[in-house]
Amino acid sequence: YMSVVVIVIEIWMIISLMNRWFTGDTTRPKIWYIEHFIWYTTFLLSALLMLIFALLFLRGRVTNRVPGKIIMAFFSFVALYFGMSVSYSDYSKGEQILCFVMMIIFVMGLINWRPIVSIILSASVFKLFYYMMEHAPDHPVSYATKVNYFTLWISIVMLSLSVYSQRLSEAEKDESLEYSSIRDELTGIPNMYYFRKKAIEVLSNEGIDNKLFLFIDIANFKAFNEKYGYDIGSELIISAAKLVKNQFEGDLYARYSDDHFVVLTNRDNIEERLDILAKMLEEQHSSTRLSLKVGSYAPKSAELDPSIACDHARYASSIIKKNYDLHYCEYDDNMDDDFHKRQYIVTHIDDAVNQGFIEVYYQPVVWADNHSICGVEALARWIDPTYGFLSPAEFIPALEEYRLIHKLDQKVLEIVCLDINNGIKNKSKIVPVSVNFSRLDFELFNVKESIENLTSKYNVPSDMLHIEITESALTANDEKLMNTVQLIKNLGIELWLDDFGSGYSSLNVLKDYTFDVMKIDMVFLQRINENEKSRAILNSIVTMASLINMETLTEGVETNEQADFLKEIGCKRLQGYLFGKPMPIRDLRSAYKCF
Ligand code: C2E
Ligand code: MG
Ligand code: MG
C-alpha cells in the first residue's frame, strides 16, 4: 500500500515537474530540474521495487524475506533523505517542514515491527534534521521550534509503539486461536484436526515404509469413570495423554476421543514401547486394573486418508477388547471383510432405521409349570439390502462402540409399541414384551421420557412392557442409573436383569438395584447333565433370587430334561429353542394366536 501511494505521488510530481520545465518556467536553474527529476525517479523506482517484491511475496513466488528487507531499507533511506532535503530547502526559504514529518511517519509505519529500530532511527533522523536546520542560512531555530520539534518526535515514537503493541496483541490472539483449533481442550495435546493434516504431510514426505498408525484404548476406562466419577476420569485421561506424549515424543500423536489416542510412528520395537507405556500407566494408577488395548495399521499407500487408517487400527484394537491376555493387535487383510461390514453398520444405521431394514423378532417365554406362553422377548434383526441378514452379534457391539446403539433401541421400542397397539386394536391376545436396553442408552437419550411418550402415543398398558438390562453393563453404586431405573419402575414397568452370571459384578449389583425378574444366563445350563456342580449352582441362584424377592427365568432351554430340572428347582419361567426361536410377528401370530 505504501509503495502504491508513493508511486502515484511520484508520478504526479514528475508530471508537474516536466510541465513546469516545458512551459518555460525560468525561475529555477536547469540543474534544479535535473536534480529533482533524479530524486523523484529514484523514489519512484524504490517504490516500484518494493511493490513488485510485495506482490511476489504475497503470491508465494518468493519465500526468502532478505531481499524484501534490503528493498525496504533502501526505500526507507530514500524516503527519509527525500523528506529531509525537500523540507530543508523549504525551511531555509521560511516555509514548513511537512515533507520531512510525512516521510518520518511513513518510514516509522513501515518498520514499526521493531520499536527499538524505529526509535533509534527516528531519534537520529530528527537530530540530524535539527542540526541541518540550526545551520540554515538566515533562519535561526527558536526555542518554540525546539520544543515543537521535541514533542513531535515523542509523539511519533508513541505512535509507532502503540501500533507495534496493537499488532503484537493481534498476533497473539491469532496464535491462541490457532493453538486452540489444533489442541485437544482437555489434555492440551494435538487434536484429530491437526493429526489428519500432519499425517498427510508425513506420509507424503517420508513415505509409508515402516510406518504404523496406532489406536490406543484404555481398556477399563468406563468402569474407572463410573467408579471414581467424571473429574477423576478426566485426570486419568490427562495423565494418559502425557504418557503418550512422552513415549512418542517426535512422532505424531493426538487424542482421538474419550479415552482413545492415535499415533503415527515407526514400527521399530513397537510392542516394547507400548509395554513401557502400559506399565507407566499401571504404575500411576496402581489401585485400579487399567490396561491398554492397542490396534495398529500399516498404511499401504501414501495417499491414504489418515482417518481411514485410524479406523482400521481402531478395529484391530476392538477385536482384542474382550480378550484379557492380548494387548496389541495389528490389522491384517483377513480382517478386511469384517472391518468393512462394521464400517458399513456404523455408517448405515440411520438408513437402516429410516428405511425399515430393522425388524423385530419375538421369542416366546413360557411358564415352567405348563409351558404356556407368558411373554415374548423382542430381539432386533437387521435385514440389509447389501449384506442380507445381520445378527445382533454383528451389529450390537459395533453400535455400542460407536455410541449409536440408542438409534436402534429407540426404533425397536417404537416397533414393539406399534405391534402391541395393533394387537389391542385387532382384539388379539396380548402378552408382555420385554425389550433389551443397552447401558449406554441411559447416557445417550432420555430413556424414561421416551418410554413414557411411546407408551402413551400407542396406548400401551405399562404391564405389557418390560425392560431388560444386561448384568455385565451394570456397576454397583451408579447413582444416576439407579435413579433412572427407579423412575421407569414408577411408570409401572417391570425391570428385568438380563444374562445374570455372565458378567463380573453379579452379586454386587443385586443389592443396589431392584429387579423384578432375573434372567439366568444360558452358560449355566450347558453342562447340567454331566456336571453335578452346575446343577447345584443353578439351584442356589434360584433360591437366592427368591430370597430377595426376584422371580427367575432361565435362558437357552433346549431340551426337556433341562426344562424339567428347572421346574423342579423352582425356576418360574423358561425361554429357549425348545419352545421357540426368535420369529417374525406373523409367525408368532400363527403359532401362538397372539398379537
Ligand atoms: P439376550 O437378550 O440374552 O437374548 C437372548 C439371545 O439368546 C438371543 O440371541 C436368542 O436368539 C438366543 N437364544 C434364545 N434361546 C436360545 C437357545 O435355546 N439356544 C441358544 N443357543 N440361543 C438362544 P440374539 O437374538 O442373537 O441376541 C443376542 C443378544 O443381542 C441379546 O441377548 C441381546 O443382548 C442383544 N440384543 C438383541 N436385540 C437387541 C436390541 O434390540 N437392543 C439391544 N440393546 N440389544 C439387543
Ligand atoms: Mg435379553
Ligand atoms: Mg439374555
Image: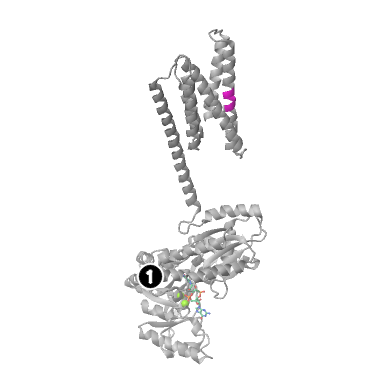
Read off the magenta span. 42-46
> In the picture provided, is 96 more to the left or to the right than 195?
left
What secondary structure predominates along the stretch shown in magenta? Answer: helix
Q: How is the image coloured?
A: one colour
Q: State whether residue 72 is above or below residue 97.
A: below
Q: Quadrant of residue 293?
A: bottom right
Seen from the viewer's position, the closer of residues 81 and 528 is 81
- Is residue 212 magenta-colored? no
- Is residue 43 magenta-colored? yes
Tell me the kind of residue under disc 1.
Answer: Leu
Q: How many marks?
A: 1
Q: Quadrant of residue 414?
A: bottom left
Which residue is painted at 42% across and 34% down in the image? Answer: 158
Which quadrant would the C terminus be assigned to in this image?
bottom left
Q: State whether residue 396 is above or below residue 503.
A: above
Q: Where is mark 1, residue-wise?
A: 481
Which residue is painted at 53% across and 58% down in the image? Answer: 254
Residue 115 makes an appearance in the image: yes
Residue 384 makes an appearance in the image: no
> In the picture provided, is 436 more to the left or to the right than 493?
right
Q: State whether residue 26 is above or below residue 475.
A: above
Where is residue 300 shown, x and y percent of the image?
66, 59
Label 1 neighbour load within 10 Å: few <14, some 14-19, many 20+: some
Where is residue 172 shown, x and y percent of the image?
46, 45
Where is residue 327 shown, x and y percent of the image?
57, 71
